[in-house]
Image (cartoon, rainbow, N blue to C red):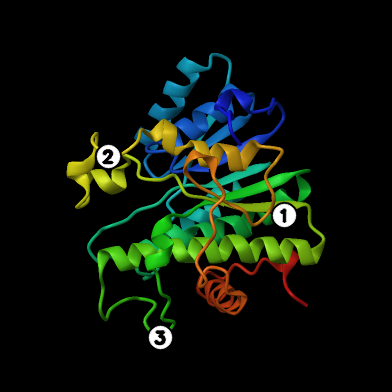
Amino acid sequence: MTGWTPDSIPDLTGRTAIVTGANSGIGRPTALELARHGARVIVAARSPEKGEATVADILRAVPGGQVEYGRLDLADLASIRRFAEGVDQVDLLINNAGIGLISRQETKDGFEMQFGTNHLGHFALTGLLLPLLLAAPGARVVTVSSDAHAWGKIDFDNLDLKRGYRRMSSYGRSKLANLLFTLELQRRAEKAGAALTSVASHPGATATNIVKIGPLQPLVGVFLQSAEAGAMPSLYAATSPDIHGGEFVGPKLKLLTPSDAARSEELARRLWDVSAELTGVRFEEIAYS
């Protein structure tokens, strides 16, 4: 991976990329670079004002680019379904959006907010877009996790975290769920003989909104890298011909080893089944027989 830069991204003409949370943080440079290399990019974001502004900014940087806004609220299953219904093609799905380090809140469907947005929202989105992904040659799903996944524990008897809520442990749990989902998606795709690659990325300590509004805010500009640097693992995972399904790409494009819990197939299957029950999204095309 030494020497890889965004200039190494191949021509993506004819391919459609969806980047969730592309209006800020590492999502914005991720969307920009994909557009710069010819992809049609859908900026998926909750706020129309911020989403349209991001589209305009990218088009100023990439005149003639194919960039559009799609309204997506990952904390609302109805919004996810409306968004998915409006998509006609997807080759690269970057499950990038995330929230963290917040006081306990709930999604519109009553899920604990960090778990509901970071994991369940992306689980549902990926499942609803699965037929399009399976129809696209060389399709990839990149899900942004974190080394914070090592803090996470999943208590299926307390998924709503009404007991013992802690900001950091809740965030870690959602990032653990992201990795469990990534690896289980790859296993199911392989078993089904589907040409779909599922990869996880970890941006590293980056100056995004998660830390700008949280207890780490004093570190911004001191110990935290730029959003452009934080986007590198996602861009590599999405576009490099050297990537393999189930890999976890971290800062400086090093391959990371997920925690023992993240590599547990038993835990992954249980989480998958619970997630399908909660969201109503079944991934029937790659379901275990």
Rendered image: mark on residue 271: none
The quadrant in which the N terminus is found is: top right
> What's the residue type where badge 3 is placed?
Asp
Q: Amino acid at mark 2?
A: Phe
> Which residue lies at the image location 64% right of the left edge and 69% below the top edge?
282
Which amino acid type is shown beneath numbered disc 1?
Pro
Secondary structure at numbered mark 1:
helix
Is disc 3 surrounded by few (<14), some (14 to 19) or many (20+) residues within 10 Å?
few
How many angstroms separate mark 2 from mark 3 (CA)?
A: 37 Å
Q: Are marks 2 and 1 in contact (CB under 8 Å)?
A: no
- On the image, the x and y values in percent for residue 252 come to 49, 39
The residue that label 3 is drawn on is 157
Query: For the view shown, which residue lies furthest in the right direction?
Result: 193
Evaluate whether residue 76 shows in this view.
no
Mark 2 or mark 1, which is nearer to you? 2
Residues tagged 3 and 1 counted as in contact (Cβ below 8 A): no
Residue 223 bears which disc, if any? 2
Label 2 vs 1, first from the N-terminus: 1
Q: Residue at x 51, y 55 (%)?
A: 80
Which of the two residues, 133 or 255, is positioned nearer the viewer here?
255
Which marked residue is nearer to the observer: mark 3 or mark 1?
3
Rounded to the nearest whole Å, what is the CA distance between mark 3 and mark 1?
32 Å
Farthest residue, direction front:
2
Mark 1 crowdedness (10 Å alpha carbons): few <14, some 14-19, many ≥20: some
Q: Secondary structure at mark 3?
A: loop
Residue underneath mark 1:
131
- Vertical placement of 39 versus 193: above or below? above
Q: Nearer the viewer, mark 2 or mark 3?
A: 2
Quick check: 89 above or below 246?
above
Element type at mark 2: loop
Going by the image, does 99 lie left or right of 37? Answer: left
